């Protein structure tokens, strides 16, 4: 048993923090109107502050020029009111799609809050190629800031968004 625990600890230390790993994007079609949907679950950004914020994305073929960005705040219920993104020094107000923040508890009994915003597809492309991308979300507790990519520092979120973008481009 000790050997198994030691082996798991070694594997986790080697691969657990690898930023380029993560969930694959999903491709689906709606039955109602045959819309193609590409999505990726939220992945961790820099997690430099509390609450830690994760970022996921969705694209729908019937709204080709927008990318929906899902911001997930972990470990507490908090309302998310607005979001801005700074792409290489240019600040962009994201479009509020949800109007309300969803609050739920996951299978591990962790609280989280989820709010969806949107960004124009051409600006999303800028985000993927940028050297520095920071997000600022306004919550009940004030502003939460975190990076998606910051020069040499990257995150699971940027790699997830790049995998998402490949699948989206292949299906648009």
Image (cartoon, rainbow, N blue to C red):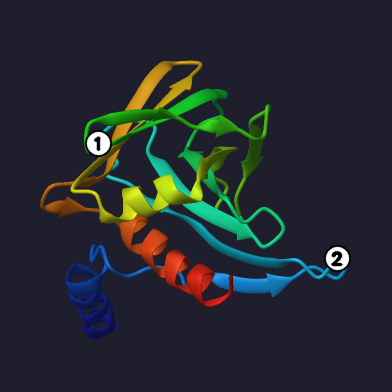
For the point 66% across and 65% down, the residue is: 37
Residue hosting label 2? 33
The mark tally for this picture is 2
Residue 94, position in %: x, y? 49, 32
Compare residues 123 and 143 and report the one nearer the observer.
123
| Residue 133 drawn above or below residue 139 | below
**Label 2: how many residues lie within 10 Å, few (<14), some (14-19) or many (20+)?**
few
| Marks 2 and 1 close (CB-CB < 8 Å) | no
Instruction: State the mark number for residue 48.
Output: 1
| Residue 74 drawn above or below residue 18 | above
| Residue 153 drawn above or below residue 32 | above
| Residue 54 drawn above or below residue 139 | below
Q: Circle 1 sits in a helix, a strand or a loop, which is it? A: loop
Nearest-to-viewer mark from 2 and 1: 2
Image quarter in which the C terminus is found:
bottom right
Compare residues 76 and 172 and report the one nearer the observer.
172
Q: Circle 2 sits in a helix, a strand or a loop, which is it? A: loop
Compare residues 86 and 158 and report the one nearer the observer.
86
Answer with the quarter of the image where residue 136 lies.
top left
For the point 56% across and 29% down, the residue is: 77
**Extreme-left residue of the structure:** 152
User: Which of pointers 2 and 1 lies earlier in the amino acid sequence?
Assistant: 2
**Label 1: how many residues lie within 10 Å, few (<14), some (14-19) or many (20+)?**
few
For the point 51% across and 24% down, the residue is: 82
Label 2 vs label 1: CA separation?
41 Å
For the point 24% across and 49% down, the residue is: 130
Residue 48, position in %: x, y? 25, 36
Residue 152, position in %: x, y? 10, 52
Image quarter in which the N terminus is found:
bottom left
Residue 157, position in %: x, y? 36, 54
């Amino acid at each position: 048993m000790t050997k198994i625990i030691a082996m798991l600890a070694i594997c986790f230390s080697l691969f657990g923090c690898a930023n380029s790993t993560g969930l694959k994007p999903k491709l689906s079609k709606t039955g109602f109107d045959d819309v193609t949907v590409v999505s990726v679950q939220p992945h961790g950004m820099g997690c430099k502050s509390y609450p830690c914020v994760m970022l996921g994305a969705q694209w729908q073929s019937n709204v080709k020029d927008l990318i929906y960005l899902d911001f997930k705040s972990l470990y507490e219920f908090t309302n998310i009111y607005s979001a801005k993104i700074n792409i290489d020094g240019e600040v962009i107000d994201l479009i509020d799609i949800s109007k309300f923040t969803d609050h739920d508890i996951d299978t591990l009994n962790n609280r989280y809050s989820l709010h969806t915003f949107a960004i124009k597809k051409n600006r999303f492309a800028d985000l993927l190629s940028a050297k520095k991308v920071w997000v600022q979300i306004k919550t009940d507790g004030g502003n939460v800031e975190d990076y998606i990519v910051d020069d040499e520092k990257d995150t699971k979120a940027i790699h997830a968004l790049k995998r998402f973008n490949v699948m989206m481009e292949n299906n648009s």
